Amino acid sequence: MSYDRELSFEYNNPTKIIFGENSVKDIGLEVDNLGGTKALIITDQGIVQAGLTARIEEALGRRYAGTFDGCIQDSGFQLINDAADFAREKGADILVSVGGGSVIDTAKGISILLREGGKLQDYAGVQMLNRPQTPHIVVPTTAGTGSEVTWAAVIKNEERNAKETLLDYYLIPNIAILDPTMTAGLPPHITAGTGMDALTHAVEGIHAMQRQPIADAMALHAIRLIVEYLPRCVEDGGDLLARGQQQLAATMAGVAFGNAQVGLVHAIAHSIGALFGVPHGLANGILLPHVMLFNVEDCADRYALIARAMDLDTRGLDDVEAGKKAAAAVWELTKRIGLTQKLRDAGVPEDGLAEAAELSMSDASIIYNPRMVIDAEEVLEVLKQAW
Amino acid sequence: MAYTYGTEEWDNAYREMIEERLKKAEKPYVMGTPEWVATFEKMVQEDEEYKKVAKNWEGSVVIHILANPANGINDDLYLFMDLWHGECRFARLVPKDIGANANFVLTGELERWQAVMKKELDVTKAMMQGKVKLKGSLPTIVRYVKASIRLTDLAAEIDTKFQSDLSETERSEYLTWFNDLREKFGF
């Protein structure tokens, strides 16, 4: 992969990462280090019922201020505004999000409102904040979103029935505690879907227009780990070595795309998520090989590197052929881990494809796709292939 | 005397001031001055490509230039563009309370805007790196990214003198007349 002399970039990765089995036990110390005194746990009811927040409460001890467990799959502006009211009532001065992407993004929204006041809608935009926000520690319970290290919060706009992306360096969480035991109970289909989310972040981070060498290094190693360990996580959720490696891969992929951005896969996944409720990781997994084929002529050199990171035999192949082989391998991986491979089986109606294509044109991710997307018709063709 | 924005009196006085500045001011115009803004307005109004790519656009856009006395910008400047369905109804300098409440506000240091106009800085990248801040719906801006690029291209086509290029004497003269206008029109 070559870069030209015009290469110029910023690499931003301020999150302190703590890794290890049972590392959540140290969360109280980390709260103290950030100057927090009253920690509010942000989570969803499934996580509470699984007993995961009880471990955090215990570790927080006297610092525990309460739990907001109202997060849903795609948290919206109103839910977050209400959650911030709850946080104020509890006197929270630090947030601990325990969950997947939606939970973490909910906490990012609350972190703004506790510091700045107002409604979250007031902060829709890019780099609107001028100072650090409420301290935020993330304990991921999935291994895919990468949100524990990114500057983005994807929030549902209930009025537009679309997902909006708030982008700000001050949204990057302070600490991510990657504890493999927190993901051990994740069911195979969610492990598979969130795992494909991580792979998509890595691949999109490499093909995105804002790609850069440091992010590429993170993404390529994430791909190596995912290809090796994701199937093991799906086959045996209690394989804590595999769980840990997958967590690291997801975080590295998060760092990669947080700096390099994403592309068309995410633009479409956000749209079908908002319109038809398709889980983000599942949508990414279905779309990724189709978007790679759509892009392959424009970034074949990068896809050839991905093929090699996936340990595919590319001898005798030119870059385009190697890129196509990588796309096929992604397809095989989703099949192996038991994921749905067609949008029709994921609840997307055929007569909804055009609307999804149109909505994708408004998603910020599309700007960074390596093949410039000019018309919604092009997106529709990809959707038809994936349907 | 100072005029009140939104009144017929302000509109008329601003129009007269522009006509006078266009006759009197030497080219190339200094970026962000009324004559520069008027030139930009005319270019957008006459541009067929912009009309085409922005045919469904609705909403006001403000280029917000942050104050930097070292560069001759003593207070923040708000360049307001009233854009509607491919038309530029007007582009003008406006007071802060009008500019800050536009549908979309793009905020940056003068140096950043200079870099954008010199094509040294991609405005999207600048937004992502926090060099330019966007207030407003990102999806809407994304949907019309070609219109945004066209506006930037048009601005880049104007023969422009930047504040940092002014000599000591030029800067002193510029500050005198420009600040006088700012006081008069409240922008």
Image (tube, coloured by chain):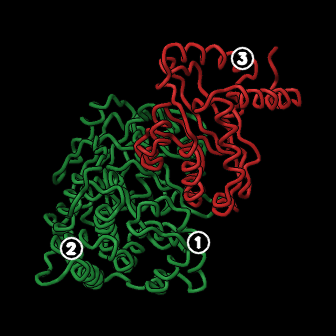
Chain colours: A green, B red
User: Which-is-in-front pick, marks 1 and 3?
Assistant: 3
**Front-most of residues A251 and A100:** A251
Residue at position x 38%, y 83% from top? A340
Mark 1: which amino acid? Glu
The answer to whether A13 is drawn above or below residue A4 in the figure is: above
Q: Quadrant of residue B5?
A: top right
- Determine whether, in the image, residue B175 is placed left or right of residue A70: right
Label 1 CA crowd tier, 10 Å (few <14, some 14–19, many 20+):
some
User: Is circle 2 on the same chain as circle 3?
Assistant: no
Q: Give the Cα distance between marks 2 and 3.
A: 61 Å
Residue A100 visible at all: no
Q: Give the Cα distance between marks 1 and 2.
A: 31 Å
- Determine whether, in the image, residue A73 is placed left or right of residue A239: right
Residue at mark 3:
B183
Q: Say which quadrant the C terminus of chain B sits in.
A: top right
The answer to whether B183 is drawn above or below residue B12 in the figure is: above
Q: Give the Cα distance between marks 1 and 3.
A: 46 Å
- Determine whether, in the image, residue A62 is placed left or right of residue A355: left
- Determine whether, in the image, residue A119 is placed left or right of residue A72: right
